[in-house]
Amino acid sequence: MEKQWDNHYDVVVVGSGAGGLTTALTAKLRGLSVIVIEKTALFGGSTSKSGGTIWIPNNPYLDEAGVKDTYEQAKTYLDSTIGDRVPDTLKNAYLTKGPEMVSYLHENTEHFRWEYTPKYSDYYPEAPGGLASGRAVEAQLFDLRKLGDDLQYLRTSGLPTKGMVLKSSEFHKVNMIMRTWIGKAKAMKVGMRLIRTLISGYKPTTLGEAVVARLYTSLKEAGGEVWLQTPFKDLIYENNRVTGIIAERNGKEVNIQARQGVVFASGGFSHSKELREKYLPQPTNTEWTLSAEEQTGDVIASGVKLGAQLDLMDKMWGTPTSAPPGSPAFMPVAERATPGLIIVNSNGERYINESVPYHEFVDQMYKNNTEQSSTIPSWMIFDKRVKNRYLVFGIMPLQPLPKEWFESGYAKKADTPEELAKQINVPPEKLAHTISRFNTFATNGKDEDYHRGDSAYDRYYGDPTLANPNLASLDKAPYYAIPIYPGDIGTKGGLVIDESARVLTKEGRSIPGLYATGNCTASVMGETYPRPGATIGASMVFGYAAAIDIAENREKRDSQIPKITMTV
């Protein structure tokens, strides 16, 4: 009996983040009909909530900015950080198809536009092949008016910026508003941008929102479709291939035919309590994730039913997080590099270089978490000098922390380290000793315990006016404490794919008609997080790879159809 289809497309994409939109845009530009379905009422997924950078070595924007990079150097870096945890074929595909994707979408769209983020170093710049100058590029500012009526459906970042729009390259400079002339000048520029938005119709956006808005606008102009509030239910598998999907639309199940392929790009399982407890390190909690809601691993389960292979299910894109009352969880990136700020365990002791990449920080939180010395939560300790000099969780220097933080018990405040220790239930004498020892390191400019400030990555968010940008004495009362938990920006385990983003079975064969990219797949980055933009970059690259493979296969099949000529 022939399948009854409600809708017909060449390509069906599940998920509307950067990976899904890149897949759909590429497919449309290659002449394929395409539909993107999105589970929630907003498009953009976790990309919209991200910093919006991508790590694509040797791409044209780096070359334009004068950053010297090569395939060989980037491959050396991947090998030195990822090792052999993922196949060479995947790493090679990432490094070759990445620059190809950037060039193709730049040349074929008006809105795919990026810029180099100066000196935002690779996360391990001292490793072989690493670049202290960095390879990150970020989406250029985008005027949201170009979205028209669809603006209301764009997922927003939720950052506490009070209307200010900061590019990734601007944040660390604005953080130095009290310390450097560059910081003051950059803050003035951002302020003028805010004034322009208040007195005119200009609606700029940046970071992940700009990535999504640029891709979405490009897709719409190319004639692509996006259906919101259309959750994926299951795959349709006929005659030994995936031929479509079952989705829910307007309260009814619909069968959507995918004549050429289905591409999963719907994120991981960060919001699934069941899967987190089954696979991730413990303890774990859905309240600690920064990923977009409704990422519960639906597509992963559907792939497994067809025999798909899974890998890296115990891994996530870790980041320490903290959730102030009445606010979503916050990701302390610059804060951890702030001089005069430390992070301690339940014994009041440091256990890590606070400035390390956030993925590594979470790994160390779990590694050091014991019954005798708990790191969950850890405590971020800082003093009045820090509060007066730098941003803390988006709150500008000299501005007080919100009263409700203290009234709710979320944040603590005391006049001495010993009094603060009692409030957070750590041994007073140990916390006092830890702070005293840290202050000695600050005076000498050398962290003898954890080498904070030695790496170029540490120094990126540090204070350039200090001999060691990441060290300053912690001795100006009052003292503050805020809890930190091992959160994530998404999980990184799932369906195993090949260099063309085809989903593989446990036997290593591809499942005809099924592709995947992004956090529903086993990441090309393996067990580590080598650089800023590794998540979004990989999702876009393999989304592009999927669309190209689908288009080329269709063209190949079309070329094999006998041509019949008729004479009259």
Image (cartoon, helix red, strand yellow):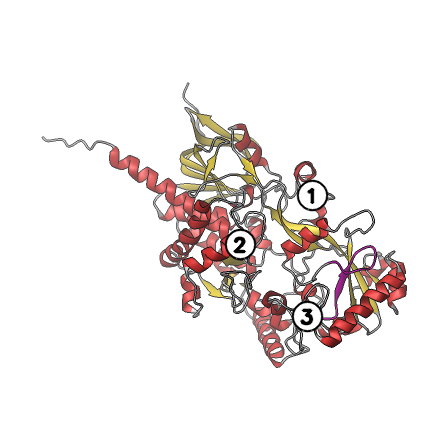
CA separation, marks 1 and 3?
30 Å
Give the camera-side residue of 56 and 300.
56
Query: Which numbered marker is on residue 534?
Result: 2
Within 10 angstroms of label 2, few (less than 14), some, or many (20 or more) residues?
many
In what element is the residue under mark 3?
loop
Q: In the image, what residue type sits under mark 3?
A: Asn
Q: Is residue 339 magenta?
A: yes
Q: Secondary structure at mark 1?
A: loop
Q: Where does residue 541 sit, x and y in percent of width and height?
A: 45, 50
Look at the numbered discs 2 and 3 and tell me whether their residues touch, using CB distance below 8 Å: no
Amino acid under label 2? Ala
Q: Which residue is labeled 1 in the image?
A: 281
Q: Which mark is residue 470?
A: 3
Among the two numbered marks 1 and 3 on one chain, the one whose residue lies closer to the N terminus: 1
Q: Can you name the residue that lies furthest to the top here?
A: 1
Q: Which residues are magenta?
A: 338-351
| Magenta residue check for 170 | no
Q: Is residue 233 visible?
A: yes
Give, as a three-letter code, the residue at label 1.
Pro
* Secondary element at image label 2: helix
Q: Is residue 182 above or below residue 116?
A: below
Q: Quadrant of the C terminus?
A: top left
